[in-house]
Amino acid sequence: MPTAVTTNQDLQDIDPRLRSRLLHIEFVEQIKISAPDFRGGYDQEGQSELSSLRFHGDQTFETFDPRADELPVEEANNLKRALMTAQQYAAEPRDWLVFTGTFGSGKTHLAASIANYRNDEGHPVLFIVVPDLLDHLRAAFNPQSPVSYDKRFDEVRTAPLLVLDDLGTESATAWAREKLYQIINHRYAARLPTVITTSWKIEELDPKVATRIDDATRCTVFAILAPSYRGGKRRDTASKRKLPATRRGR
């Protein structure tokens, strides 16, 4: 019989008996609405109030400096490939993209460029620094908070495209580790497009998070070799490091 159903839950989280009916491709047509909640919490451009993308409006692919005349050849080529990787991902976000490298090496600029590109194309994106994300979640526990904790948490967990900047700089409390793992694990299982930047080596992160990032079938990890932009120009005679192969997912 003709039936229309709406839900805020991911179908994978629904009771298995009901889910088996809703996933029946012969009788059910699924339509996923990715537009943000128009009832509040978003600015005039459709960005979540959680998002700090507005502070990175000048960080685009066009303004990214590949430093071709400054860096040794291997590092310059590595940075050029990082830019190309980010551009390809922005055109069709799929699974995860993780940028690693020292502070100031261009990771955030590339992640913000992806977010700005998608936002300019009219696609919802949530860009947030990890410590700020945890502060927002803590604030939602306050009885005076205009947004419930569950709604705030679900907004992050299910964002059509989530950019987590500076993973590893958050306070390493048990609560913080648990919340981050819940977000990351859900997005891993659901294969939701996610961009992560971190100045830590993958093996130095929370092991539960590291195992998700280390899955080459779902995650591309790109190690940026360039030093900080803020460190001044370097001569071409500077020591060179061996360029590691980029690990690409499916």
Image (cartoon, helix red, strand yellow):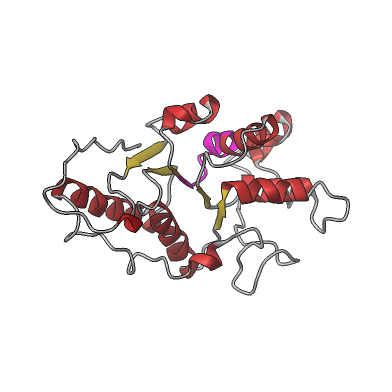
Q: Residue at x 37, y 31 (%)?
A: 216
Question: Quick one: quadrant of the C terminus?
Answer: top left
Q: Is residue 219 left or right of residue 191?
A: left
Q: Is residue 210 visible?
A: yes
Q: Residue at x 56, y 51 (%)?
A: 129
Hey, which quadrant is residue 17 in on the image?
Answer: top right
Q: Is residue 211 magenta?
A: no
Q: Is residue 2 visible?
A: no
Q: Is residue 120 left or right of residue 49?
A: left
Q: Residue at x 62, y 38 (%)?
A: 171
Near-viewer residue (177 or 190): 177
Q: Position of residue 103 (x, y in %)?
A: 41, 48
Near-viewer residue (222 or 176): 176
Q: Residue at the right extreme?
A: 143
Q: Residue at the left extreme?
A: 237
Q: Which residues are magenta?
A: 185-197
Q: Position of residue 191 (x, y in %)?
A: 50, 39
Q: Is residue 194 magenta?
A: yes
Q: Position of residue 193 (x, y in %)?
A: 49, 47
Q: Is residue 197 above or below residue 205?
A: below
Q: Residue at x 24, y 36 (%)?
A: 245
